[in-house]
Amino acid sequence: GCGGVSGTVFTVVNKCSETIWPGVLTGSGGASLANGGFALTPGQSVPVNAPAGWSGRFWGRTGCNFDSSGAGSCATGDCAHGLMCESAGGVPPVSLAEFTI
C-alpha cells in the first residue's frame, strides 16, 4: 500500500538579481522549518523539508542587514526577530505563500 503522506520538500529558489532572505512561519504548535529564515544568493536554491501535517507560510524579505549572530532587520518583509523569524510573521506589506500539508 501507499502508507499515506510522509511530508514534502519545498524548493525555494532566488530568481532575483540580489540576495533575498525568505522568512518561514510555522502555524501553532508545529515544527519550525529552516530556523524561520535564511539567505539566498541570486540563482541559489534551498530544499526545505516539511513533515506531514505542517502548516505555515513563506515570504520574501529584501534589503536585510544582519550581524554574525543573526540580529538585524530588513527593508521589506521584516519579522522583528532578525534572520530567524521562528515566531513572528512578516511586517505588512508582504506577499505570503501559505500551505497546509
Image: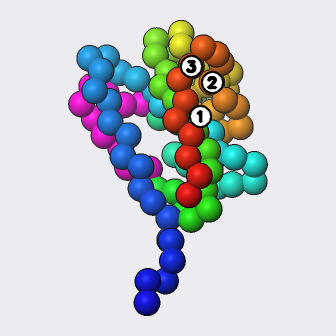
Magenta-colored span: 39-48
Vertical relation: 55 (above or below) 74: below
Taking the spot 56% from the left edge, 57% from the top edge, the residue there is: 101
Taking the spot 75% from the left edge, 54% from the top edge, the residue there is: 29
Vertical relation: 87 (above or below) 15: below
Distance between the Cα atoms at labels 2 and 1? 11 Å
Residue 90 image point, x, y percent: 63, 24
Asked which secondary structure carries label 2, the reply is loop
In which quadrant is the N terminus drawn?
Answer: bottom left
What's under tag 1, amino acid-wise? Met
Between 70 and 78, the residue placed more toward the observer is 78
Taking the spot 42% from the left edge, 30% from the top edge, the residue there is: 39
Between 98 and 10, the residue placed more toward the observer is 98
Distance between the Cα atoms at labels 3 and 1? 17 Å
- Which label belongs to residue 84? 1
- Prevailing SS of the magenta stretch: loop
Q: Is residue 40 magenta?
A: yes
What's under tag 2, amino acid-wise? Gly
Residue under numbered circle 3:
94
Vertical relation: 90 (above or below) 26: above
Do tag 3 and tag 2 residues touch (Cβ < 8 Å)?
Answer: yes
Can you tell which of label 3 and label 2 is closer to the viewer?
Answer: 3
Mark 3 is surrounded, within 10 Å at the Cα level, by few (under 14), some (14 to 19) or many (20 or more) other residues, namely few
Q: Is residue 58 magenta?
A: no
What's under tag 3, amino acid-wise? Val
